[in-house]
Amino acid sequence: MRAVLKGIHAIIEDVNEARKVYSLGFYGRPLTTGKPKGPEDINEPLILSLIEAVYLAEQGVLEVFAEDGRKLSAEELKTCGLKAIDRFDVLYGVYSDLRRKGFVVRSGMKYGADFAVYSVGPGLEHAPYLVIALKYGQELKPHELLSFGRVSHSTRKELILAIVGPGKVINYVSFKWTKI
């Protein structure tokens, strides 16, 4: 499959290829329309985040080209991500670890989280998890944790902190909110 890098997104312009990539695990989103329920709902180019593009390039599924037509390696894409996106290394580490574990990982921005994580996929279930990616030693203030907890609880999602430590080892800490 082929995509073109435009800023911090990779665009798959061929609709048939867009459907194939989406069907591999709910990657990307249509350029202008809402949430597709399945690949058959993709009738326009597909936009991938830079994190998704790097992951798919590393998996050998996607070839990404610069606007000048030059093919970019996965390492070059990572370098673009490190320059353009704050905490890219931490976010990418968590994203790729969750994908390798079989989860569908989407942006959690609308929940104030880094990722919304699905066991099955969007349109088939509500995301059961919200994930915040942290670098080991990063300070997390009590009010930040409470804010994350309030949103996850009100949306009936489990809050998980993904802490990326030395050697890129990731530890997951799950929170369960209870009434006293």
Image (cartoon, rainbow, N blue to C red):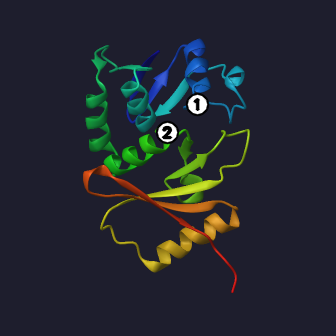
Instruction: Answer above or below: position of 179 versus 49.
Output: below
Query: Amino acid under label 1?
Result: Gly
Residue 99 x, y percent position in the rendering: 49, 39
Residue 36 position within the rendered picture, expressed as x and y whole percent measured from the top left: 69, 31
Please report whichever mark, 2 or 1, sits nearer to the chain's N-terminal start.
1
Residue holding disc 1 = 25
The percent coordinates of residue 23 (x first, y second) are 62, 24
Q: Is residue 80 left or right of residue 179?
A: left
Residue 131 - label: none
Residues 89 and 11: in front is 89
Mark 2: give few (<14), some (14-19) or many (20+) Cα within 10 Å.
some
Residue drawn at the location 30% of the way across and 36% of the way down: 78
Whole-angstrom CA distance, mark 2 to mark 1, is 9 Å
- Check the image and name the residue furthest to the bottom: 180
Numbered label tally: 2
| Residue 102 placement, left or right of 126 | left
- Depicted 83 relative to depicted 178: above or below: above
Position in image of residue 43 (x %, y %): 66, 19
Q: Is residue 137 left or right of residue 91?
A: left
Residue at 48% of width from left, 73% of height from top? 144
Describe the element under mark 1 as helix, strand or loop. loop
- The residue at 55%/22% (across/down) is 21
Q: Residue at x 49, y 31 (%)?
A: 48
Q: Which residue is mark 2?
A: 99
SS class of the residue under badge 2? helix
120 in relation to 165, above or below: above
Query: Looking at numbered disc 2 in the image, what kind of residue is underneath it?
Result: Arg
Number of other residues with Cα within 10 Å of mark 1, as a class: few under 14, some 14 to 19, many 20 or more = some
Q: Are marks 2 and 1 in contact (CB under 8 Å)?
A: yes
Q: Quadrant of the C terminus?
A: bottom right
Residue 81, quarter of the rendered image = top left
